[in-house]
Amino acid sequence: MPDGADQTLWAKAMSRMHFAAAACDTAKDASDDVPFLAIVNDLFDAVADVTALNDRILPAGSTSPDAAKLQQGLWPSVGTQQSATADSGSSYRVTVRDYTTRPDHTATVHVQTCLDHGPAGATEAVDWAPWYVIMADGTKAKPLKQKPRNGLGGPLYPDGDGKPLSVGSCVSGLIAFALPAGATGQAVEVVRDAPDFVWSVQQPG
């Protein structure tokens, strides 16, 4: 974490970034009179300020532990249940119960997904594709294309090969990820796209 004047600049830049992000979220569904593009530009400027501080303060290739802890505070931690409503009107509850690294340079995430509400007769396919893991160095771990032959020590989360999820039902299991070659540090986030969910991964120490 930066010290002195840099710490003040850091705090101001982060505050500005969060304010702009919140403004974007509020403005996206508002009338055309809202200067949405101006808000987006302000968000990008704030992100640039934070990035510039990182580049000036941190040695090349390093990651600030305090920055990682700050980032963790933005999202619920692994083990937390989250809810969202998709554009289709379907409502989900999703929980990442556990994140585990393996000796073969892979990692697993234990996921549970429940479809609580939706249009009459609605079903939703579930698979591994929307999931990924963000490492501390910014690299992305994507799901394995082939399932491990020796298993993962538990049932697998469906990957398009199971029954579609129907309203009122849940499904759970493990998703396996190939950690990027040369990735440094620990995973910091587990992410699911559309609907969007993010969990922070507890860091050691």
Image (cartoon, rainbow, N blue to C red):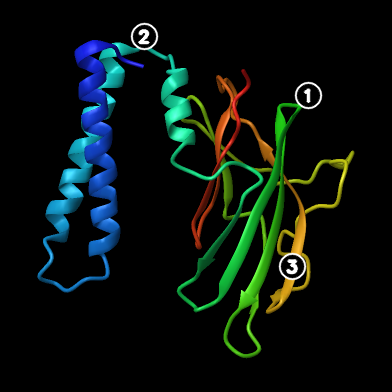
Left or right position of 42 against 158? left
Q: Which mark lies nearer to you, 3 or 2?
A: 3
Left or right position of 64 against 23? right
Q: Position of residue 95 (x, y in %)?
A: 65, 54
Quadrant for residue 32, please give it.
bottom left
Q: Position of residue 126 (x, y in %)?
A: 67, 65
Amino acid identity at mark 3: Cys
Q: Is residue 155 visible?
A: yes
Q: Quadrant of the C terminus?
A: top right
Tell me the tag on residue 103.
Answer: 1
Query: Which residue does the image show at 49% across and 35% down from the upper left?
Result: 72
Residue indicated by mark 3: 170
Q: Position of residue 190 (x, y in %)?
A: 57, 43
Amino acid identity at mark 1: Pro
Left or right position of 103 against 36? right
How far apart are labels 3 and 2 at the CA level? 46 Å
Marks 1 & 3, CB-CB < 8 Å contact: no
Against 173, residue 199 (above or below) is above
Q: Kindly give the residue lying farthest to the bottom in the view shown.
A: 120
Quadrant for residue 102, please give it.
top right
Marks 3 & 2, CB-CB < 8 Å contact: no
Q: Which mark lies nearer to you, 1 or 2?
A: 2
Task: Between residue 140 and residue 12, name the one nearer to us.
Answer: 12
Query: Which residue does the image show at 35% across and 12% down from the upper left?
Result: 58
Against 160, residue 187 (above or below) is above
Task: Between residue 161 and residue 46, name the one nearer to us.
Answer: 46
Query: Which residue does the image show at 23% across and 11% down from the upper left?
Result: 4
Residue indicated by mark 2: 59
Query: Which residue does the image show at 78% across and 24% down from the upper left?
Result: 103
